[in-house]
Structure formats: C-alpha cells, structure tokens
C-alpha cells in the first residue's frame, strides 16, 4: 500500500438536524465535502478564482442539494466500525482501520468556520531504509481559534509536532 | 479518500523541462553525476585538497495521485542533526528563497544539475552555473539541519486538487577538505502535507 490507512473519518452535523459523513454509511462511497462550499470562500462580489479565472462562486463550486442553505453546527472525527470499513474496502478498494477510539467532536456557533483536515508525513531514509508513511495527525477546530491535533488513537499531539 | 503520495526525484532533461521522474522506493544517493542510481557508488563526492566539493543537486518532490479533495502546505524537514562528516563549513543544504515557498516549481524553474562528473557538482549558489531559481537570492541555500519538525521549510503552499507534482526541495551536499572519507550513515529527510 502506498498510503497510510485512515483511522478516523469526519461527520458534519448541519442546522436542521441532518448530517453529512465522509463515507456513505450504506454504500461506503466517499462523499467529498469541499471547503469551497463555505460562503466565506467568496470575495465581496461573490466571485472566486478557479483555474486562474474569476468566476461566480456557485459556478465554480456547485453546492450539493443536501448542503444548500445549511450551517455546520457540529463536526468531528469518528472511528470506523468493522461494518463500515468492509463497505469502504468494497466500494473504494482502500483499507481503513476500525477501532474503538473515542470520537472527537466540536460545536460551532453562528458564522464560525470549521477546520478539519489530516496532516500526513513521509520519511525518506536516504541510504537504505526506504519510504515510511508516518503516523497521520487529525486536525480539528474553529478558524481563528486554537486547534486540536489528534494522533491515530485519538489522543492529543503536541501542537509543535504536527 | 487518502491520496496516493510518492516521493519522486527528477533527473535529466533541460532547464524548465525535467527529463525523468523516478519513484524513490528504497533509497537515494547524492552523487557527482546527474542520475538516479541509488546503488551506484561510482560517483562519490571527493574530499578536496582545499575549498569545497559538491554533489550534483537533486530535485525531490511529491507525486500526488488517487482520489482526494485538496492537498497543500507541503513542508520539508530533518531531525535537526545530519550525522554525515562534511568537514568544516560543509553541510547538507537546501535551495532557499528569500520569501514565499522554498520549493522549485518544476515545470518552469527546474534547473538541470551540472558540474564535472566524478569530481564536483556546481554549487547551487554559483552566480553563473548555480541553480537559477536560487542563486540570485540574498540567502540562496539553507542548512537542512535548521529545518526541523517544529520549524520546517515550506516547500509548496499551493492548493493541489488533482493529480500532479508538488514543488521540489532542491538539496545538495557540500564537503570540505577535512571531511572524513567513507560511506556515510543513513539519514532521514521528511515531507509533511495537509490533506482534506
């Protein structure tokens, strides 16, 4: 495998009580929630630069029906259960690792923008050790506020080592 | 999904047009020849009688493929202590920009490594034969030992949303006349990136 298997996936809960998960719980297919859906990514004229050209935001990044007009009120990193891991392997061919780690979840207020990404490291041992796909750090927080950095067991990572 | 990310080393070609991208799977070697041949020990860096000798510089980047939404914030670092015996004033160095990303945009700024084979590479800093993306900078190189996990060098801050290569770290050995001859210890250099 030329990747480090995922240990967590995100679920965003939306105003109105619905939710969107990184992986469809029924099919295991990935749902690529895109940060450019966020209204804050547009300039004052509702335009955005894509492929070097300024185009209307909605033209550049059409927002899926289930996301329109909604705010994210809660978002978190959740561990995979064996059933979902099996569906993801079948649907995408990619391995994810189930665990019983605790989820990490944050609440968002009005107009607060979530920060949710993974930080990956690749180590090249120059003489003979080859390539090492090092531990993934899962990052979560609110833009403009201190972030949480989580290791693959869900524990906290020193913010300087991320 | 998690992207497939490999480490690639470019060799050959011409300025602004890399020849071959080699997938680094086992090792790489800083040599006095522009080649990707980790097992070839025929082109060591000689110890000079005075001044310095250099390896040919190498371009090392990340190759992004598979399904992903966005990758950015590519950083480069060492463990802060490169255990090679370079001699006084010698170092493992990285091409450095005075501002912005330190990585070399391959499609426009790739600079074919040059020098005298089996003797010395041209210094990245050389005003005439050095690396054109760096040699006019106020500080054209940085010691890799100063790039640490807590304070890495930003190689590429671009948002990558499709399969492509990132900007490259350009690295080179500088060896002084009091260096100690012999094959050096294994060393680790690392890339880190963010993925959504």
Image (cartoon, coloured by chain):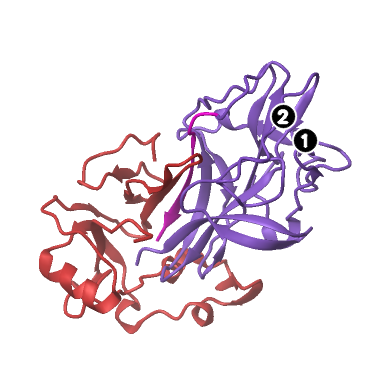
Chain colours: A red, B purple
- To which residue does mark 2 refer? B46
Q: How crowded is mark 1: few (under 14 residues within 10 Å), some or many (20 or more)?
A: some
- Above or below residue A139? Residue B124 is above
Q: Tag 2, which chain?
A: B
Frontmost residue, A23 versus B35:
B35
Quadrant hosting residue A155: top left
Task: Quickly name the residue at label 1.
Answer: B119
Query: Tag 1, which chain?
Result: B
**Residue B127 position within the rendered picture, expressed as x and y whole percent measured from the top left:** 87, 38
Task: Work out which quarter of the rendered image holds the N terminus of chain B and state it.
Answer: bottom left
Secondary structure beneath dot 2 equals: loop
* Magenta stretch encompasses residue A57: no
Residue B179 in picture, x, y percent from top left: 66, 19
Query: Which image quadrant for residue B91?
Result: top right
Percent across and percent down for residue B75 are: 52, 45
- In this rendering, the count of numbered labels is 2
What residue appears at the point 80 percent right and 40 percent down from the top-left corner? Answer: B135
Please indicate, yes or no, whether residue B101 appears anywhere in the rendered image.
Answer: no
Secondary element at tag 1: loop
Left or right side of B147 for B58: right
- Horizontally, residue B89 falls left or right of residue B130, namely left
| Label 1 or label 2, whichever comes before in sequence order | 2
Residue visible at 66% across and 74% down in the picture: A53
Q: Residue at x 29, y 75 (%)?
A: A92
Image marks 1 and 2: residues in contact by CB distance under 8 Å: yes
- Real-space Cα separation, disc 1 to disc 2, in angstroms: 6 Å
- Image location (x, y in percent) of residue B168: 62, 51
Residue for point 72% across, 29% down: B46
Q: Is residue B195 magenta?
A: yes
Q: Give the range drawn in magenta.
A: B184-196
């Amino acid at each position: 495998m030329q990747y480090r298997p995922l240990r967590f996936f995100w679920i965003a809960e939306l105003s109105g009580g619905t939710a969107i998960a990184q992986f469809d719980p029924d099919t295991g297919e990935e749902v690529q929630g895109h940060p450019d859906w966020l209204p804050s990514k547009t300039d004052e004229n509702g335009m955005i630069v894509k492929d070097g050209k300024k185009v209307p935001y909605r033209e550049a990044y059409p927002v899926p029906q289930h996301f329109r007009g909604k705010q994210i009120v809660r978002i978190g990193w959740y561990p995979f259960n064996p059933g979902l891991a099996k569906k993801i392997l079948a649907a995408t061919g990619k391995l994810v690792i189930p665990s019983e780690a605790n989820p990490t979840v944050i609440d968002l207020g009005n107009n607060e923008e979530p920060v949710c990404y993974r930080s990956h490291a690749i180590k090249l041992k120059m003489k003979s050790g080859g390539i090492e796909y090092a531990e993934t750090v899962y990052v979560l927080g609110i833009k403009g506020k201190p972030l949480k950095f989580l290791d693959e067991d869900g524990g906290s990572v020193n913010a300087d080592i991320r | 999904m998690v992207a497939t990310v490999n480490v690639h080393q470019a060799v050959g070609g011409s300025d602004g047009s890399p020849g071959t991208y080699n997938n680094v799977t086992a090792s790489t070697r800083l040599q006095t020849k522009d080649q990707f041949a980790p097992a070839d020990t025929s082109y060591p860096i000689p110890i000079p009688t005075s001044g310095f000798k250099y390896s040919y510089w190498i371009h090392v980047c990340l190759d992004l493929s598979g399904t992903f939404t966005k990758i950015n914030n590519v950083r480069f670092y060492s463990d802060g202590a490169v255990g090679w015996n370079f001699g006084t004033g010698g170092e493992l160095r990285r091409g450095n920009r005075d501002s912005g990303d330190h990585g070399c945009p391959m499609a426009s700024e790739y600079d074919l490594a040059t020098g005298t084979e089996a003797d010395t590479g041209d210094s990245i800093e050389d005003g005439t034969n050095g690396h054109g993306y760096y040699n006019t900078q106020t500080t054209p190189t940085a010691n890799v030992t100063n790039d640490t996990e807590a304070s890495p060098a930003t190689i590429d801050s671009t948002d990558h949303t499709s399969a492509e290569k990132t900007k490259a770290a350009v690295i080179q050995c500088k060896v002084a006349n009091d260096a100690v001859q012999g094959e050096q210890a294994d060393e680790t250099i690392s890339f880190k990136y963010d993925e959504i």
